[in-house]
Image (cartoon, grey):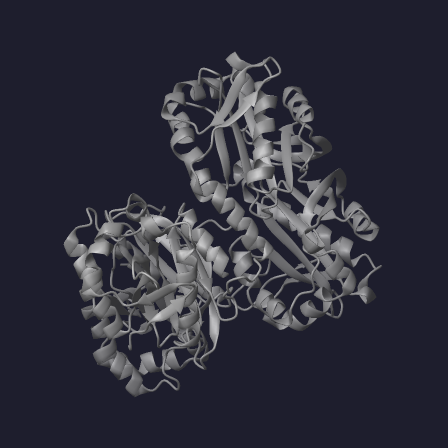
Amino acid sequence: MSDVVALRPWRDADADDLAAGCADPLTQRFLPLLPSPYTRDDALWWIREGAPAASEAGGAAYAVTDPASDRVLGGAGMRAVREGKSEIGYWVAPWARGRGVATAAARALAASAFSNGVGRLALRTDPANGPSQRVAIAAGFAREGVERGGGLGRDGDRYDVLVWGRLASDPDGPRPRLLPDLPGHGPSDPGRLTDGVVVLRPVGPADADDTYRVHALPDVVATSVPPRPPTRAAIERRCAHAESLWLAGERAALTIRDGETGAYAGEIGLYFWEPTTQQAMVGYSLFPEWRGRGFATRAVRLLVAWAVEHAGLVRVVAGTAPDNVASQRVLERAGFEREGYQRARLPGPDGTRVDDIMFAVVAPSADPARRGLD
Amino acid sequence: MEPVELREAGLVLRPFRAADTDAVHRACQDPQIQRWLNIPRPYLPRHAVEFVTAYTEQAWGSGTGAPLGVFDAATGELLGSNGLIMLQRDYRIGEVGYWVAPWARGRGVAEAATRAVARWGLTRLGLERIAWRAELGNFASLVVAHRLGFRMEGVLRAGAPRHDGHRVDCWSAALVPGELREAGEPLSEPDRLAIVRAAAFGAPQPTLPAVTPGGERIALRPPAERDVDAVVAACRDPETARWTTVPRPYDRPQGEHFVRRRAPDAWRGGVGMVAAIVDAADRYCGSMELRMYQWDPGVGNVGFLVAPWARGRGYAAAALRAACAWGFDALALRRIEWWATVGNEASRRVAERVGFTMEGLARRRYLHDGQAQDSWTAGLLPGEVR
């Protein structure tokens, strides 16, 4: 099956590990249908009844174990195949996280399913569950959509669910990522970009307050597309799902912070709007008290340099409203050049269209051959 | 689950009965129903019997579905099928599925019936999410979903089964509480636009006529198998290779891909038109593409090439004019962009002749043969086509 893990049926002797793994707060958070609290009796029920019933129904429910010690590392399963389609799922015990256990299990399940004639495998993850999405990508699944309210929480709440698919005809190996992680990224560190004066860090759920306040500023609303104030709920979702969009290669959202104190100054984002031509767009917003100190210019420079160096971008564009002189100055100071005036380029208020000035910066030496984009 | 009877806009929805067999069998002979739905082929009387009796009883009995026949409230005539083809009451989710008998189309039956089912599901059953799926290209179904307020959530590759065991890509959408649009409520702007486009792409790709300054009658029509040799010849031409992003090398497989996949997929996916420019004798003379940007469906992008044997006769301008007029009219575009590698004077003259305004020079805008090339860019707004 795999060198990293073995997949085998559950046994009574696994009960303590299974109970400990499923009682873990992260397991409980992202598998809200597990009993809570999760006891040894729940584990024994799963081992003796739940898992065998899943197998009898045509699915599979395995213990994921260490091949050397046979100790439980997690669980993995597959639904019964219907009309050429099935779905897999996995969880990893807290003592086994961060070393590719779920990826190995997902690959093993996929290999087995495809060799048995399955045409499509689905996988559902919580968009707030970054590690699980990393598993999906590493196991070759493509992100295909977001089911709004597709998940049912423990308290009857609903949450969005990402749908991933892998086809028998898809290439083996991980899906390529268009936006890599930042320098310094690790299991408990999202990484950062800094020039000593400002620090850029990926936006996360804890940034919802600041993000909401900056996006509700009247002059930020006025330059948004379309120019409508955001709702608090939309901003919370956006912050909770920021890592998800980063992993999807759609958008890198970062907070701009004071390098000395770490205080929140604003936000900057890189939207990978045309991967086929290796182009992205940059946009930023600062609180008024942090303007006029060169923070936006520094943030743009840092992000563009990273995007060119690490994401292989050939060209980064930024649009500004024709009368937004402050933003145009920032772009010019950050090395952008004004390239054109595009009429009716963007949706404006009340169904109108608004003009946009196109600024761009290009990579000093564009060498597209080094990246395998399709 | 207790069977229901729903009334809506002159319709009655109730579980099928044995007496409905003949009408269901007749309706399911329809080529459109057979084309888009996962039903047995050939559709035999026993399939209809099974559907109106065993399947219906099993779904209602176990609460795993809620299939309903749709009938004319006045005459009792069968008009279609509707209801929940998936139901998980413990998870408070369901999925709608519907068809309309060929004799009942064009009068809003699917919309009204699905509205009744969705309202019943959201209120009486307490559902918190109702999903909708349709094979890519089923624009009639897509229109119903947009009218009712379903929001698109993605494209599932090989997401839906078909009668022959193959799986097909499908659009996926859902409705959550508070989103169901009642009859008479105004459409949102995105839904209105989506419906306009579904009407365009739901019909076969049109042949758009055009006239050159010399009086030649040319046309834009769907590329066909008989064009492959000419497409290959046009795309192997050094000038074509120099100024456009056609694949290199360009051989027969590329030409076949253009005709069999690139053009029909754009139309079926509703993302744009890929057409052959043909002369009065219907001979391939070039290609024209008009695509919508994913990031802003108000904006389109044109690209074209003319075969070496057809240059200098005004074909490109005539074809571009027809494509842009169609884009503003049929797709309700608000802006069409033209991009061309700096130095492509011929293309620029064509764009300017049609009314495009040059707007800038974008450095390293497009990849050409692995090299990022500078591009001119221009824009055309509604009312500016010359």
Viewer-nearest residue: A81 or B382: B382
Is residue B97 at all visible to an observer of this figure? yes
* Residue A144: x %, y % from top left: 44, 54
* Depicted A371 relative to depicted B207: above or below: below
Q: Quarter holding the C terminus of chain B?
A: top right
* Depicted A53 relative to depicted A333: above or below: below
* Residue B85: x %, y % from top left: 32, 63
Q: Is residue B50 left or right of residue A325?
A: left
* Depicted B219 relative to depicted A341: above or below: above
Q: Quarter holding the N terminus of chain B?
A: bottom left
Q: Is residue B301 left or right of residue B384?
A: left
Is residue A196 at all visible to an observer of this figure? no
In the rendered image, which quarter is residue B23 located in? bottom left
Q: Is residue A298 left or right of residue B181?
A: right
Viewer-nearest residue: A216 or B126: B126
How many labels sit on residues? 0
Q: Residue furthest front?
A: B74
Q: Is residue B279 left or right of residue A302?
A: left
Viewer-nearest residue: B350 or A203: B350
In the rendered image, which quarter is residue A110 located in? bottom left
- The residue lying at 58 percent from left, 64 percent from top is A190
Q: Residue furthest left?
A: B46
* Residue B210: x %, y % from top left: 55, 23
- The residue lying at 63 percent from left, 37 percent from top is B336
* Residue B308: x %, y % from top left: 52, 14
